[in-house]
């Protein structure tokens, strides 16, 4: 049996936001395996789905360069240790020049930037600023032809950048869809999608999330019941990828059985069933609405998904359009900030 140290408990708590005693308990069960312990917490609905925003603390800025003819867009994230340095004019200029370099040279990765003459300039500039600064990541989208529409958005704090790409039926539609794509980019800035469509999800990921999310709702319902408040619906599924033809046929059969029990005449069923099925889908696709851009409720009209909103916007222009790619960068996303003990640091230096 592995020894469960305070450091291990602290690490698991930092990663999951779960209570200390629950972290210790699952670490014992997992014989000290952090990954296995994390899964146990998730399955029991104890681990949070994601860390709170205020726990993500890397500083820095993003950059965006968009071609004058909207045929290409590049986004870049550069991190600094402090927000003070991120607001330095030298740092801002470094972000601008790096974005230009990536846009112009199309490197495949960070090493492809840093191993060039520009990389030497980057390192020299960092040395002058006097703080650890890193080019973390970047992305570029390009139009293969004039039926592709591209647009982007940088949030006012310069910490979030999004570019969106759509395939249209014609150059005319692509030109007219630019404003809509700017709005979709603003939507993505706020709603934090991780992937384009539910079709991108791995089956094992969906299954793991299903177990955890259902357990979370059950625990919330225990508290709601104690407070004598309405309970939340406990879904059977969380993604459209799980709603097979057989599942939908079963759902429709259940709706019909309920209508029969209520004494509703069959002649009006066709007016009721579509809405009931739509509610079933909405209740059982929460993962898609949280993480998949096309499946999210559009912030400018929450009666439509992003995919439907884009489709309707193109239809109003007499054409068709479909979002085929997007990139969203947020400064520090996924990076844990090391919070030091200032008093301990001073004491160590004086000893």
Image (tube, helix red, strand yellow):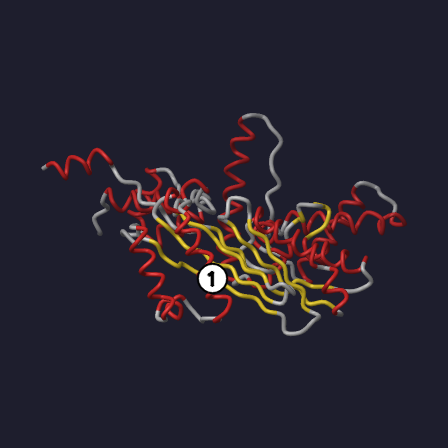
**Residue at x-position 27% and y-position 51%:** 32
Q: Please, what secondary structure does the residue beneath circle 1 have? A: strand
**Residue at x-position 33% and y-position 46%:** 12
Seen in the picture, residue 295 relative to 41 is either above or below; the reply is below
> Residue lying farthest bottom?
145
Q: Is residue 139 left or right of residue 24?
A: right
* Figure quadrant of residue 338: top left
**Which residue is disc 1 drawn over?**
138
Q: Position of residue 124 (x, y in %)?
A: 31, 60
* Figure quadrant of residue 84: top left
Q: Is residue 243 left or right of residue 132?
A: right
Q: Position of residue 195 (x, y in %)?
A: 55, 59
Q: Position of residue 18 (x, y in %)?
A: 39, 41
Seen in the picture, residue 288 relative to 85 is either above or below; the reply is below
Q: Is residue 120 left or right of residue 290?
A: left
User: Dot 1: within a 10 Å radius of its alpha carbon, few (fewer than 14), some, or many (20 or more) residues?
Assistant: many
């Amino acid at each position: 049996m592995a020894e469960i140290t305070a450091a291990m408990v602290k690490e698991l708590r930092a990663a999951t936001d779960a209570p200390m005693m629950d972290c210790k308990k699952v670490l014992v069960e997992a014989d000290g395996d952090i990954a296995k312990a994390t899964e146990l917490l998730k399955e029991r609905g104890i681990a949070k789905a994601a860390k709170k925003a205020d726990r993500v603390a890397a500083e820095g800025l993003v950059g965006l360069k968009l071609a004058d003819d909207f045929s290409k867009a590049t986004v870049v994230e550069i991190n600094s240790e402090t927000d003070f340095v991120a607001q330095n004019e030298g740092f801002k200029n470094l972000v601008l020049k790096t974005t230009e370099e990536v846009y112009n040279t199309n490197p495949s990765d960070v090493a492809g930037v840093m191993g060039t003459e520009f990389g030497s300039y980057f390192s020299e500039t960092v040395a002058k600023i006097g703080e650890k600064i890193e080019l973390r990541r970047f992305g570029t989208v390009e139009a293969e032809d004039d039926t592709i529409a591209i647009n982007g958005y940088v949030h006012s704090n310069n910490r979030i950048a999004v570019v969106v790409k759509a395939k249209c039926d014609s150059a005319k539609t692509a030109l007219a869809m630019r404003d809509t794509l700017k709005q979709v980019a603003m939507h993505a800035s706020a709603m934090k999608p991780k992937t384009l469509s539910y079709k991108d999800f791995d089956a094992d990921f969906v299954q793991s999330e299903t177990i955890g999310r259902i357990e979370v709702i059950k625990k919330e319902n225990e508290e709601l019941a104690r407070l004598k408040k309405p309970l939340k619906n406990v879904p059977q599924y969380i993604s459209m990828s799980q709603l097979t033809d057989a599942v939908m046929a079963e759902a429709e059969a259940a709706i019909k059985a309920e209508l029969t029990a209520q004494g509703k005449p069959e002649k009006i069923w066709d007016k009721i069933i579509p809405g009931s099925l739509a509610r079933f889908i909405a209740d059982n696709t929460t993962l898609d609405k949280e993480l998949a851009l096309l499946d999210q409720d559009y912030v400018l009209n929450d009666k439509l998904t992003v995919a439907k909103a884009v489709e309707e916007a193109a239809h109003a222009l007499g054409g068709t359009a479909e979002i085929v790619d997007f990139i969203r960068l947020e400064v520090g996303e996924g990076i844990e900030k090391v919070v030091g003990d200032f008093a301990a640091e001073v004491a160590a230096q004086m000893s």
